[in-house]
Amino acid sequence: TVRIATEADKEAIVAFARKFFFVDEPLTIAIRLMEGGGRCTELEDYCTESLDEANSLVALNDSGEVVGIILNATKRRKEGDAQPEELPPPEGLPNTKFRNIVRLLDEADAQADVFGRFPDVDAYVDIKILSVHPDYRGRGIAKQLIDQSREIARSQGVPMVRCVCTSYYTHKAVARLGFEHVHTMPYKSFVDEEGSPVFQTESPHDNVETYVARV
Ligand code: ACO
């Protein structure tokens, strides 16, 4: 079953994300986000801050347990500003590893420049987090969550959905669903001051791929 996530799901969503997304998404693996234990409260907040928009979804199994999440937020074009503010300013974040993730996503956002490319589009639903329980992968749950996010965007009058795919499998899912490819940013192009790649991702996760779909 797939349904809209509400504030009441917050705890279950954070627990699910901490158990899976924080440890098995290509960026979080590459930077060993959770090495040493503890919590990444910045990422927890990022996961749940837009639940009130009623455009995020949870997939539940027959027992009512969460087996998939897609966490979305609507981004609107700002007057006199080609780029929306995507994420909290990197310098304000205490967790260095999460700050590097924010920097990379900011860079991919600037390079893809969706509002610049699509002057007629004033808002899009951004797929921020997508995660499926390992036991339930490869069954089309991600595709279902993405497809239903597109339906919600349509019902809320938002003309576009954007997905910044940090995983090769997300890129496969959106491509299969007919999304339009707009930009590729190789992970190895994102380097530190010494010129070394910040994220040594595992194959086949070689690029950040940005896709959009008009709804
Ligand atoms: N090996 C090969 N292909 C795969 C695999 C795999 N392990 N997993 C999925 N795929 C392919 C599928 O075949 C499908 O492609 P197709 O339609 O051409 O056959 C496509 O990827 C999507 O398959 P789904 O079954 O819809 O995806 P799934 O439900 O397994 O979830 C997801 C994919 C969310 C990426 C899952 O692997 C996951 O949770 N990974 C860890 C977290 C992560 O990386 N999240 C995405 C980051 S990007 C973002 O959040 C916006």
Image (spheres, grey):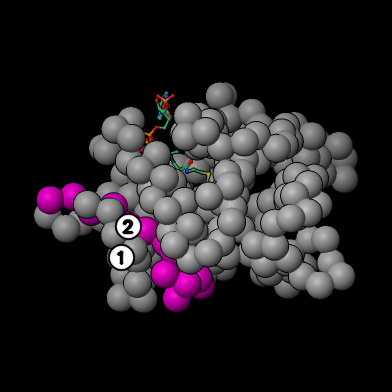
Q: Position of residue 121 (x, y in %)?
A: 70, 56
Could you tell me which residue is drawn at 18 percent across and 50 percent down? 61
Q: Which mark is residue 148?
A: none
Give the mark nearest the N terminus, 1 or 2. 1
Residue 33 in view: no
188 sits to left or right of 165: right
Q: Secondary structure at mark 2?
A: strand
Q: Position of residue 27 (x, y in %)?
A: 58, 43
Disc 2: residue Cβ within 8 A of ligand 1's nearest atom: no
Residue position for label 2: 58
Give the amino acid type for the residue marked by disc 1 in the picture: Ala
Q: Are marks 1 and 2 in contact (CB under 8 Å)?
A: yes
Disc 1: residue Cβ within 8 A of ligand 1's nearest atom: no
202 sits to left or right of 99: left
Question: In the image as oriented, which residue stretches furthest toward the top?
Answer: 203
Figure quadrant, ligand 1: top left
Q: Secondary structure at mark 1?
A: helix
Could you tell me which residue is drawn at 47 percent across and 72 percent down? 53
Tell me where the magenta segment starts and ends, as one range: 48-62
Q: Position of residue 173 (x, y in %)?
A: 46, 34
Residue position for label 1: 12
Question: In the image as oriented, which residue stretches furthest toward the left?
Answer: 63
